[in-house]
């Protein structure tokens, strides 16, 4: 039916190993597999782009314009300061879901601001690796 883009920002390649008390034990591969299963169950394809570099994530969002029906993005720390990612999301014309494993609002002060939040359809945060399935299901339900 359509392609859903899953974007993973800085440090998410370390999932499973990085601060498991905050982010859990699931690896990024396992999270992507769960997101893909949810997309395929709804008849969509899932494409995953992971980068520690802001510009590569911006490029992936540009490449998704007019091609992907939805984007699910965990921008990592870029959430809190990347205006270029915010602008790229504003320029994306499909459904968009901001995703976090942790609940940034319940953590340090500097994590409480999301500069991308004004440009996404909605946010899934605080449900650990389950969030990957939930975020795809949320996107699919918005697609109607
Ligand atoms: C994160 C939350 C961010 O504050 C943090 O910088 C991350 C991961 C999350 O998934 O909980 O790298 O996006």
Image (cartoon, rainbow, N blue to C red):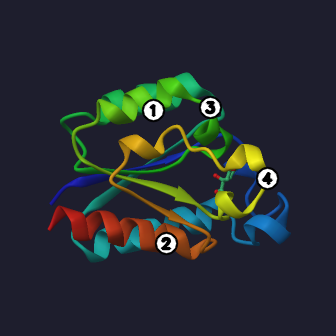
**Residue visible at 60% across and 61% down in the picture:** 29
- Relative to 140, residue 111 above or below: above
Quarter-wise, where is residue 141 in the image? bottom left
Q: Quadrant of the C terminus?
A: bottom left
* Secondary structure state at the residue bearing disc 1: helix
Q: Earlier in the sequence, mark 2 or mark 3?
A: 2
Q: Earlier in the sequence, mark 1 or mark 2?
A: 2
Q: Describe residue 5's horizontal placement relative to residue 130 as left or right.
A: left
Which of label 1 and label 2 is nearer to you?
1
Horizontal and vertical percent for residue 113? Answer: 61, 44
Quarter-wise, where is residue 36 in the image? bottom left
Q: Are marks 2 and 3 in contact (CB under 8 Å)?
A: no
Residues under labels 4 and 3: Cα distance? Answer: 14 Å
Which of label 2 and label 4 is nearer to you?
4
Residues under labels 4 and 1: Cα distance? Answer: 21 Å
Residues under labels 1 and 2: Cα distance? Answer: 26 Å
- Relative to 58, residue 3 above or below: below
- The label number, if any, that marks residue 108 in the structure image: 4
Q: Quadrant of the N terminus?
A: bottom left
* Secondary structure state at the residue bearing disc 2: helix
Disc 1 target residue = 86
Horizontal and vertical percent for residue 30? Answer: 60, 68
Horizontal and vertical percent for residue 16? Answer: 77, 65
**Residue visible at 62% across and 70% down in the picture:** 126
Disc 2 target residue = 34
- The label number, if any, that marks residue 12 in the structure image: none
Q: Nearer the viewer, residue 108 or 130?
A: 108
Disc 3: CA contacts within 10 A as few (<14), some (14-19) or many (>=20):
some
Q: Is mark 4 within 8 Å of ligand 1?
A: no
Q: Earlier in the sequence, mark 1 or mark 3?
A: 3
Which of label 2 and label 3 is nearer to you?
3
């Amino acid at each position: 039916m359509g392609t859903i883009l899953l974007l993973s920002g800085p440090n998410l390649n370390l999932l499973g190993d990085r601060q498991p008390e905050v982010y859990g034990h699931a690896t990024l591969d396992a999270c992507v597999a769960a997101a893909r299963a949810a997309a395929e169950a709804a008849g969509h394809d899932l494409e995953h782009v992971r980068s520690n570099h802001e510009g590569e994530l911006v490029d992936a969002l540009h490449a998704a314009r007019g091609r992907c029906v939805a984007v699910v993005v965990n921008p990592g720390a870029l959430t809190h300061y990347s205006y270029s990612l915010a602008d790229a999301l504003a320029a994306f014309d499909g459904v968009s879901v901001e995703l976090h494993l942790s609940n940034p609002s319940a953590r340090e002060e500097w994590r409480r601001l999301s500069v991308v939040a004004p440009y996404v359809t909605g946010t899934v945060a605080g449900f650990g690796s389950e969030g990957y399935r939930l975020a795809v299901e949320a996107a699919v339900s918005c697609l109607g």
